[in-house]
Image (cartoon, rainbow, N blue to C red):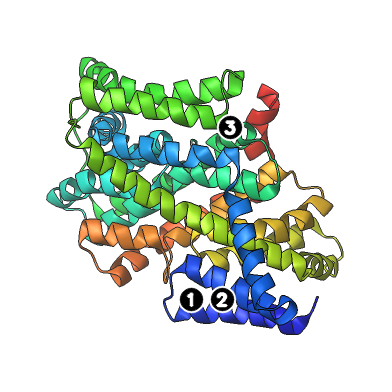
Amino acid sequence: MDPVHTLLLLGIFIALLVLGVPIAVGIALSALVTLLFTMGLETASITVAQRIATGLDRFTLLAIPFFILSGQLMNRGGSARRLVDLARALVGMLPGGLAYVNIVAGMLFGAISGSAAAAVAAVGGFMIPRMREQGYDTSFSAAVNVSSATTSLIIPPSNILIVYALASGGVSIAALFVAGYLPGLLVGLALMAVAGFIAKKRGYPVDAPVAPREIFRRFLAALPSLFLVVLIMGGIVSGTFTATEAGAIAVVYSFVLAVPVYREVTLRDVPKVLVDASVTTSIVLLLVGTSMAFSWVLAYERIPQFVGESFALLGGSPIATLLSINVILLVAGTVLDMTPAVLIFTPILLPVVQSIGVDPVHFGIVMVLNLCIGLCTPPVGSVLFLGCTVSGARIMDVSRALIPLYIAMVVALLLVTFVPDIALALPRWLGI
Protein backbone atom coordinates (compact mmCIF):
# COMPACT_ATOMS: atom_id res chain seq x y z
CA MET A 1 0.00 0.00 0.00
CA ASP A 2 1.34 3.41 -0.97
CA PRO A 3 0.51 5.78 1.93
CA VAL A 4 0.72 8.85 -0.33
CA HIS A 5 -1.87 7.45 -2.76
CA THR A 6 -4.08 6.33 0.11
CA LEU A 7 -4.01 9.76 1.74
CA LEU A 8 -4.68 11.35 -1.64
CA LEU A 9 -7.69 9.09 -2.31
CA LEU A 10 -9.28 9.58 1.09
CA GLY A 11 -8.26 13.24 1.41
CA ILE A 12 -9.82 14.26 -1.91
CA PHE A 13 -12.97 12.30 -1.13
CA ILE A 14 -13.40 13.91 2.31
CA ALA A 15 -12.60 17.38 0.95
CA LEU A 16 -15.23 17.04 -1.77
CA LEU A 17 -17.79 15.87 0.80
CA VAL A 18 -17.05 18.92 2.96
CA LEU A 19 -17.42 21.20 -0.06
CA GLY A 20 -20.87 19.74 -0.72
CA VAL A 21 -20.02 18.10 -4.05
CA PRO A 22 -22.60 15.39 -4.94
CA ILE A 23 -21.33 12.20 -3.40
CA ALA A 24 -21.31 10.19 -6.65
CA VAL A 25 -19.20 12.89 -8.31
CA GLY A 26 -16.87 13.02 -5.30
CA ILE A 27 -16.36 9.26 -5.37
CA ALA A 28 -15.56 9.24 -9.09
CA LEU A 29 -13.22 12.26 -8.95
CA SER A 30 -11.24 10.95 -5.97
CA ALA A 31 -10.73 7.61 -7.74
CA LEU A 32 -9.76 9.31 -11.00
CA VAL A 33 -7.27 11.75 -9.47
CA THR A 34 -5.59 8.97 -7.48
CA LEU A 35 -5.13 6.85 -10.61
CA LEU A 36 -3.68 9.83 -12.51
CA PHE A 37 -0.51 9.55 -10.43
CA THR A 38 0.04 5.89 -11.37
CA MET A 39 -1.51 5.47 -14.82
CA GLY A 40 -1.68 8.83 -16.56
CA LEU A 41 -4.76 10.72 -17.73
CA GLU A 42 -5.86 8.51 -20.63
CA THR A 43 -5.46 5.16 -18.87
CA ALA A 44 -6.94 6.44 -15.61
CA SER A 45 -10.00 7.86 -17.39
CA ILE A 46 -10.58 4.64 -19.33
CA THR A 47 -10.10 2.52 -16.20
CA VAL A 48 -12.62 4.51 -14.13
CA ALA A 49 -15.16 4.50 -16.98
CA GLN A 50 -14.74 0.75 -17.46
CA ARG A 51 -15.14 0.05 -13.75
CA ILE A 52 -18.32 2.14 -13.59
CA ALA A 53 -19.77 0.30 -16.61
CA THR A 54 -18.67 -3.09 -15.29
CA GLY A 55 -20.12 -2.32 -11.87
CA LEU A 56 -23.53 -1.66 -13.41
CA ASP A 57 -23.41 -4.67 -15.74
CA ARG A 58 -25.04 -7.02 -13.21
CA PHE A 59 -28.36 -8.78 -13.70
CA THR A 60 -28.95 -8.62 -9.93
CA LEU A 61 -29.15 -4.81 -10.07
CA LEU A 62 -32.36 -4.99 -12.10
CA ALA A 63 -34.15 -5.76 -8.84
CA ILE A 64 -33.41 -2.25 -7.56
CA PRO A 65 -35.43 -0.22 -10.12
CA PHE A 66 -38.26 -2.75 -9.86
CA PHE A 67 -38.51 -2.47 -6.07
CA ILE A 68 -38.16 1.33 -6.24
CA LEU A 69 -41.08 1.54 -8.69
CA SER A 70 -43.12 -0.87 -6.57
CA GLY A 71 -42.45 1.28 -3.52
CA GLN A 72 -43.55 4.43 -5.37
CA LEU A 73 -46.82 2.77 -6.37
CA MET A 74 -47.42 1.54 -2.83
CA ASN A 75 -46.59 4.96 -1.41
CA ARG A 76 -49.17 6.70 -3.61
CA GLY A 77 -51.72 3.91 -3.73
CA GLY A 78 -53.25 4.15 -0.25
CA SER A 79 -51.36 1.28 1.38
CA ALA A 80 -49.88 3.50 4.10
CA ARG A 81 -53.28 4.72 5.32
CA ARG A 82 -54.69 1.20 5.51
CA LEU A 83 -51.63 -0.07 7.38
CA VAL A 84 -51.85 2.83 9.85
CA ASP A 85 -55.52 2.00 10.46
CA LEU A 86 -54.61 -1.62 11.14
CA ALA A 87 -51.73 -0.69 13.44
CA ARG A 88 -53.96 1.72 15.33
CA ALA A 89 -56.53 -1.02 15.90
CA LEU A 90 -53.84 -3.44 17.13
CA VAL A 91 -51.67 -1.27 19.42
CA GLY A 92 -53.32 2.14 19.72
CA MET A 93 -54.81 1.33 23.13
CA LEU A 94 -51.45 0.36 24.67
CA PRO A 95 -49.30 2.74 26.78
CA GLY A 96 -47.58 4.85 24.16
CA GLY A 97 -50.67 4.90 21.97
CA LEU A 98 -49.91 6.64 18.71
CA ALA A 99 -46.15 6.27 19.19
CA TYR A 100 -46.63 2.50 18.97
CA VAL A 101 -48.91 2.97 15.96
CA ASN A 102 -46.22 5.03 14.22
CA ILE A 103 -43.57 2.36 14.80
CA VAL A 104 -45.74 -0.61 13.83
CA ALA A 105 -47.07 1.17 10.73
CA GLY A 106 -43.51 2.14 9.74
CA MET A 107 -42.40 -1.48 10.02
CA LEU A 108 -45.39 -2.76 8.05
CA PHE A 109 -45.04 -0.15 5.32
CA GLY A 110 -41.28 -0.72 5.18
CA ALA A 111 -41.91 -4.41 4.66
CA ILE A 112 -43.86 -3.71 1.48
CA SER A 113 -42.01 -0.65 0.14
CA GLY A 114 -38.37 -1.34 1.09
CA SER A 115 -37.73 2.39 1.36
CA ALA A 116 -37.00 4.37 4.53
CA ALA A 117 -37.74 7.64 2.74
CA ALA A 118 -41.12 6.36 1.56
CA ALA A 119 -41.95 5.15 5.08
CA VAL A 120 -41.06 8.54 6.61
CA ALA A 121 -43.09 10.46 4.06
CA ALA A 122 -46.12 8.16 3.89
CA VAL A 123 -46.48 7.16 7.55
CA GLY A 124 -45.16 10.44 8.97
CA GLY A 125 -47.37 12.55 6.76
CA PHE A 126 -50.40 10.67 8.06
CA MET A 127 -49.41 10.06 11.71
CA ILE A 128 -47.60 13.20 12.88
CA PRO A 129 -50.61 15.55 12.47
CA ARG A 130 -52.76 13.10 14.44
CA MET A 131 -50.13 12.77 17.16
CA ARG A 132 -49.97 16.58 17.36
CA GLU A 133 -53.77 16.74 17.72
CA GLN A 134 -53.59 14.42 20.73
CA GLY A 135 -50.92 16.52 22.46
CA TYR A 136 -47.76 14.67 21.43
CA ASP A 137 -44.64 16.80 21.18
CA THR A 138 -43.82 17.32 17.50
CA SER A 139 -40.10 16.63 17.95
CA PHE A 140 -40.84 13.37 19.74
CA SER A 141 -43.33 12.36 17.04
CA ALA A 142 -40.79 13.08 14.30
CA ALA A 143 -38.08 11.18 16.19
CA VAL A 144 -40.31 8.11 16.47
CA ASN A 145 -41.21 8.35 12.78
CA VAL A 146 -37.59 8.74 11.65
CA SER A 147 -36.15 5.92 13.77
CA SER A 148 -38.90 3.41 12.95
CA ALA A 149 -38.59 4.10 9.20
CA THR A 150 -35.05 2.70 9.19
CA THR A 151 -36.42 -0.79 9.88
CA SER A 152 -37.61 -0.82 6.27
CA LEU A 153 -33.97 -1.27 5.21
CA ILE A 154 -33.58 -4.38 7.38
CA ILE A 155 -36.98 -6.00 6.87
CA PRO A 156 -37.20 -7.24 3.24
CA PRO A 157 -37.56 -6.43 0.47
CA SER A 158 -34.55 -4.16 0.94
CA ASN A 159 -32.59 -2.57 -1.89
CA ILE A 160 -29.54 -2.07 0.31
CA LEU A 161 -29.31 -5.81 1.03
CA ILE A 162 -29.22 -6.37 -2.74
CA VAL A 163 -26.37 -3.85 -2.98
CA TYR A 164 -24.50 -5.69 -0.18
CA ALA A 165 -24.98 -9.02 -2.00
CA LEU A 166 -23.39 -7.43 -5.07
CA ALA A 167 -20.48 -5.89 -3.13
CA SER A 168 -19.79 -9.11 -1.21
CA GLY A 169 -19.27 -11.09 -4.38
CA GLY A 170 -22.25 -13.42 -4.26
CA VAL A 171 -23.90 -13.71 -0.83
CA SER A 172 -27.41 -15.11 -1.29
CA ILE A 173 -30.03 -12.36 -1.55
CA ALA A 174 -32.68 -14.80 -0.34
CA ALA A 175 -30.61 -15.58 2.79
CA LEU A 176 -30.09 -11.87 3.45
CA PHE A 177 -33.79 -11.14 3.04
CA VAL A 178 -34.82 -13.88 5.46
CA ALA A 179 -32.05 -12.93 7.91
CA GLY A 180 -33.41 -9.39 8.15
CA TYR A 181 -36.74 -10.30 9.75
CA LEU A 182 -35.75 -11.02 13.37
CA PRO A 183 -33.21 -8.14 13.64
CA GLY A 184 -35.80 -5.76 12.15
CA LEU A 185 -38.39 -6.96 14.63
CA LEU A 186 -35.86 -6.59 17.47
CA VAL A 187 -35.13 -2.98 16.52
CA GLY A 188 -38.86 -2.27 16.33
CA LEU A 189 -39.49 -3.77 19.78
CA ALA A 190 -36.57 -1.81 21.26
CA LEU A 191 -37.98 1.42 19.82
CA MET A 192 -41.44 0.57 21.14
CA ALA A 193 -40.07 -0.05 24.64
CA VAL A 194 -38.36 3.34 24.76
CA ALA A 195 -41.16 5.27 23.04
CA GLY A 196 -43.78 3.65 25.28
CA PHE A 197 -41.82 4.54 28.42
CA ILE A 198 -41.46 8.19 27.34
CA ALA A 199 -45.09 8.47 26.26
CA LYS A 200 -46.36 6.99 29.54
CA LYS A 201 -44.05 9.22 31.58
CA ARG A 202 -45.36 12.32 29.77
CA GLY A 203 -48.96 11.19 30.09
CA TYR A 204 -49.76 11.09 26.38
CA PRO A 205 -53.30 9.78 25.63
CA VAL A 206 -54.11 6.36 24.22
CA ASP A 207 -56.86 5.20 21.87
CA ALA A 208 -59.96 3.46 23.09
CA PRO A 209 -59.94 -0.32 22.52
CA VAL A 210 -61.22 -1.35 19.10
CA ALA A 211 -63.89 -4.01 18.78
CA PRO A 212 -62.76 -7.36 17.30
CA ARG A 213 -65.12 -6.89 14.34
CA GLU A 214 -63.48 -3.53 13.51
CA ILE A 215 -59.99 -5.04 13.85
CA PHE A 216 -61.02 -7.75 11.38
CA ARG A 217 -62.44 -5.15 8.97
CA ARG A 218 -59.21 -3.13 9.03
CA PHE A 219 -57.18 -6.30 8.60
CA LEU A 220 -59.16 -7.19 5.49
CA ALA A 221 -58.63 -3.68 4.11
CA ALA A 222 -54.87 -3.97 4.63
CA LEU A 223 -54.61 -7.62 3.57
CA PRO A 224 -53.97 -6.97 -0.15
CA SER A 225 -50.98 -4.77 0.77
CA LEU A 226 -49.66 -7.28 3.31
CA PHE A 227 -49.99 -10.09 0.78
CA LEU A 228 -47.20 -8.50 -1.27
CA VAL A 229 -44.73 -9.60 1.43
CA VAL A 230 -46.02 -13.17 1.28
CA LEU A 231 -45.91 -13.14 -2.52
CA ILE A 232 -42.33 -11.86 -2.75
CA MET A 233 -40.73 -13.77 0.10
CA GLY A 234 -42.72 -16.94 -0.52
CA GLY A 235 -41.60 -16.98 -4.13
CA ILE A 236 -37.95 -16.27 -3.32
CA VAL A 237 -37.66 -18.74 -0.44
CA SER A 238 -39.46 -21.52 -2.35
CA GLY A 239 -37.21 -20.96 -5.36
CA THR A 240 -40.17 -20.11 -7.62
CA PHE A 241 -38.44 -16.92 -8.78
CA THR A 242 -35.28 -14.93 -8.14
CA ALA A 243 -35.05 -11.60 -6.30
CA THR A 244 -34.92 -9.80 -9.65
CA GLU A 245 -38.02 -11.58 -10.90
CA ALA A 246 -39.68 -10.86 -7.55
CA GLY A 247 -39.11 -7.14 -8.16
CA ALA A 248 -40.89 -7.34 -11.51
CA ILE A 249 -43.78 -9.25 -9.94
CA ALA A 250 -43.96 -6.63 -7.15
CA VAL A 251 -44.35 -3.88 -9.76
CA VAL A 252 -47.24 -5.66 -11.48
CA TYR A 253 -48.97 -6.44 -8.17
CA SER A 254 -48.46 -2.89 -6.83
CA PHE A 255 -49.86 -1.41 -10.06
CA VAL A 256 -52.96 -3.59 -9.92
CA LEU A 257 -53.44 -2.74 -6.24
CA ALA A 258 -52.97 1.02 -6.65
CA VAL A 259 -54.94 1.57 -9.87
CA PRO A 260 -57.93 -0.79 -10.30
CA VAL A 261 -58.25 -2.12 -6.71
CA TYR A 262 -57.67 0.84 -4.36
CA ARG A 263 -58.24 3.37 -7.19
CA GLU A 264 -55.97 5.94 -5.51
CA VAL A 265 -53.61 6.17 -8.51
CA THR A 266 -55.12 7.10 -11.87
CA LEU A 267 -53.65 6.36 -15.28
CA ARG A 268 -52.81 10.08 -15.52
CA ASP A 269 -50.66 9.71 -12.39
CA VAL A 270 -48.62 6.82 -13.79
CA PRO A 271 -46.17 8.95 -15.87
CA LYS A 272 -45.32 11.02 -12.75
CA VAL A 273 -44.78 7.81 -10.76
CA LEU A 274 -42.49 6.47 -13.50
CA VAL A 275 -40.49 9.71 -13.61
CA ASP A 276 -40.03 9.79 -9.82
CA ALA A 277 -38.95 6.13 -9.79
CA SER A 278 -36.54 6.78 -12.67
CA VAL A 279 -34.92 9.73 -10.87
CA THR A 280 -34.45 7.69 -7.70
CA THR A 281 -33.11 4.74 -9.67
CA SER A 282 -30.61 6.90 -11.57
CA ILE A 283 -29.27 8.32 -8.31
CA VAL A 284 -28.87 4.89 -6.74
CA LEU A 285 -27.27 3.27 -9.79
CA LEU A 286 -24.88 6.18 -10.35
CA LEU A 287 -23.75 5.72 -6.75
CA VAL A 288 -23.36 1.99 -7.36
CA GLY A 289 -21.24 2.50 -10.49
CA THR A 290 -18.92 5.14 -9.05
CA SER A 291 -18.58 3.25 -5.77
CA MET A 292 -17.52 0.12 -7.66
CA ALA A 293 -14.78 2.17 -9.34
CA PHE A 294 -13.73 3.54 -5.93
CA SER A 295 -13.65 0.02 -4.50
CA TRP A 296 -11.44 -1.13 -7.37
CA VAL A 297 -8.96 1.65 -6.58
CA LEU A 298 -8.99 0.56 -2.93
CA ALA A 299 -8.12 -2.97 -4.00
CA TYR A 300 -5.50 -1.70 -6.47
CA GLU A 301 -3.79 0.20 -3.65
CA ARG A 302 -4.06 -2.90 -1.40
CA ILE A 303 -5.95 -0.97 1.28
CA PRO A 304 -8.16 -3.94 2.29
CA GLN A 305 -5.05 -6.04 2.98
CA PHE A 306 -3.59 -3.24 5.09
CA VAL A 307 -6.80 -2.93 7.09
CA GLY A 308 -6.85 -6.70 7.64
CA GLU A 309 -3.28 -6.66 8.91
CA SER A 310 -4.13 -3.76 11.21
CA PHE A 311 -7.05 -5.66 12.73
CA ALA A 312 -4.76 -8.68 13.17
CA LEU A 313 -2.84 -6.56 15.70
CA LEU A 314 -5.90 -6.89 17.94
CA GLY A 315 -4.79 -10.49 18.45
CA GLY A 316 -7.65 -12.02 16.45
CA SER A 317 -10.15 -11.22 19.21
CA PRO A 318 -13.65 -11.44 17.64
CA ILE A 319 -15.15 -9.15 20.30
CA ALA A 320 -12.52 -6.41 19.87
CA THR A 321 -12.66 -6.70 16.08
CA LEU A 322 -16.46 -6.51 15.88
CA LEU A 323 -16.62 -3.62 18.34
CA SER A 324 -14.01 -1.73 16.32
CA ILE A 325 -15.88 -2.37 13.08
CA ASN A 326 -19.16 -1.21 14.64
CA VAL A 327 -17.52 2.04 15.71
CA ILE A 328 -16.06 2.55 12.22
CA LEU A 329 -19.43 1.96 10.55
CA LEU A 330 -21.36 4.11 13.03
CA VAL A 331 -19.01 7.02 12.39
CA ALA A 332 -19.01 6.43 8.61
CA GLY A 333 -22.80 6.37 8.60
CA THR A 334 -22.95 9.92 9.92
CA VAL A 335 -21.16 11.30 6.83
CA LEU A 336 -21.85 8.76 4.07
CA ASP A 337 -25.08 7.73 2.42
CA MET A 338 -25.88 4.05 2.80
CA THR A 339 -25.27 2.81 -0.75
CA PRO A 340 -21.70 4.13 -1.18
CA ALA A 341 -20.88 3.16 2.42
CA VAL A 342 -21.88 -0.46 1.76
CA LEU A 343 -20.00 -0.58 -1.55
CA ILE A 344 -16.86 1.00 -0.11
CA PHE A 345 -16.62 -0.80 3.23
CA THR A 346 -17.79 -4.29 2.25
CA PRO A 347 -14.65 -5.27 0.29
CA ILE A 348 -12.49 -3.78 3.07
CA LEU A 349 -14.19 -5.25 6.13
CA LEU A 350 -15.75 -8.50 4.90
CA PRO A 351 -12.40 -10.35 4.59
CA VAL A 352 -11.54 -9.19 8.12
CA VAL A 353 -14.70 -10.60 9.70
CA GLN A 354 -14.53 -13.79 7.65
CA SER A 355 -11.02 -14.37 9.02
CA ILE A 356 -12.48 -14.52 12.55
CA GLY A 357 -15.35 -16.80 11.54
CA VAL A 358 -18.21 -14.32 11.03
CA ASP A 359 -20.81 -15.45 8.52
CA PRO A 360 -21.15 -13.04 5.52
CA VAL A 361 -24.95 -13.01 5.89
CA HIS A 362 -24.64 -12.08 9.58
CA PHE A 363 -22.14 -9.35 8.76
CA GLY A 364 -24.41 -7.91 6.08
CA ILE A 365 -27.20 -7.45 8.61
CA VAL A 366 -24.78 -5.93 11.14
CA MET A 367 -23.45 -3.49 8.53
CA VAL A 368 -26.93 -2.39 7.46
CA LEU A 369 -28.01 -1.94 11.10
CA ASN A 370 -25.01 0.30 11.73
CA LEU A 371 -25.69 2.43 8.68
CA CYS A 372 -29.41 2.66 9.48
CA ILE A 373 -28.47 4.54 12.64
CA GLY A 374 -26.44 6.92 10.46
CA LEU A 375 -29.53 7.70 8.36
CA CYS A 376 -31.09 9.47 11.35
CA THR A 377 -27.85 11.07 12.59
CA PRO A 378 -26.50 14.51 11.60
CA PRO A 379 -24.80 15.83 9.54
CA VAL A 380 -25.83 13.68 6.54
CA GLY A 381 -28.86 11.85 7.95
CA SER A 382 -31.13 11.88 4.91
CA VAL A 383 -34.03 10.24 6.73
CA LEU A 384 -33.64 12.71 9.62
CA PHE A 385 -33.85 15.68 7.24
CA LEU A 386 -36.89 14.25 5.47
CA GLY A 387 -38.59 13.56 8.80
CA CYS A 388 -38.01 17.15 9.88
CA THR A 389 -39.45 18.38 6.58
CA VAL A 390 -42.57 16.23 6.99
CA SER A 391 -43.11 17.28 10.63
CA GLY A 392 -41.98 20.91 10.42
CA ALA A 393 -39.75 20.41 13.50
CA ARG A 394 -36.20 21.74 13.81
CA ILE A 395 -33.30 19.33 13.24
CA MET A 396 -31.71 20.08 16.62
CA ASP A 397 -34.99 19.45 18.46
CA VAL A 398 -35.58 16.15 16.69
CA SER A 399 -31.94 15.11 17.22
CA ARG A 400 -32.31 15.63 20.98
CA ALA A 401 -35.56 13.65 21.00
CA LEU A 402 -33.79 10.87 19.11
CA ILE A 403 -31.11 10.29 21.78
CA PRO A 404 -33.00 7.61 23.80
CA LEU A 405 -34.09 5.99 20.53
CA TYR A 406 -30.46 5.97 19.35
CA ILE A 407 -29.57 4.10 22.54
CA ALA A 408 -32.30 1.53 21.86
CA MET A 409 -31.03 1.00 18.30
CA VAL A 410 -27.42 0.59 19.49
CA VAL A 411 -28.50 -1.97 22.10
CA ALA A 412 -30.32 -3.92 19.37
CA LEU A 413 -27.23 -3.62 17.16
CA LEU A 414 -24.97 -5.06 19.87
CA LEU A 415 -27.37 -7.95 20.44
CA VAL A 416 -27.41 -8.79 16.73
CA THR A 417 -23.62 -8.41 16.54
CA PHE A 418 -22.80 -10.77 19.40
CA VAL A 419 -25.76 -13.17 19.10
CA PRO A 420 -25.46 -14.28 15.46
CA ASP A 421 -28.47 -16.60 15.69
CA ILE A 422 -30.77 -13.57 15.77
CA ALA A 423 -29.86 -13.09 12.11
CA LEU A 424 -28.98 -16.64 11.10
CA ALA A 425 -31.67 -18.75 12.79
CA LEU A 426 -34.33 -18.28 10.10
CA PRO A 427 -31.99 -18.84 7.08
CA ARG A 428 -30.65 -22.01 8.70
CA TRP A 429 -34.11 -23.25 9.57
CA LEU A 430 -35.27 -22.71 5.99
CA GLY A 431 -32.05 -24.21 4.59
CA ILE A 432 -31.10 -21.12 2.61
Relative to the observer, which residue lies in front, 64 or 237? 64
Where residue 112 appears, as percent x and y from the top left, is: 39, 33
Q: Tell me if 354 is positioned left or right of 254 in this view.
A: right
Find numbered disc 1 in the image and state the secondary structure of the residue it sits on.
helix
Residue 384, by quadrant, is bottom left
Residue 208, by quadrant, is top left
Q: Amino acid at mark 3?
A: Val
Q: Amino acid at mark 2?
A: Phe
- Identify the mark at residue 178; answer none if there is no mark: 3
Q: Quadrant of the N terminus?
A: bottom right
Q: Quadrant of the C terminus?
A: top right
Mark 3 residue crowding within 10 angstroms, few (<14) / some (14–19) / many (20+): many
| Residue that label 1 marks | 17
Q: Amino acid at mark 1?
A: Leu
Find numbered disc 2 in the image and state the secondary structure of the residue it sits on.
helix
Give the Cα separation between the discs numbered 1 and 3: 35 Å
Name the residue: 35% across, 41% down: 106
Q: Tell me if 351 is positioned left or right of 149 in this view.
A: right
Where residue 417 appears, as percent x and y from the top left, is: 66, 50
| Residue that label 2 marks | 13
Residue 9, by quadrant, is bottom right
Give the Cα separation between the discs numbered 2 and 3: 35 Å
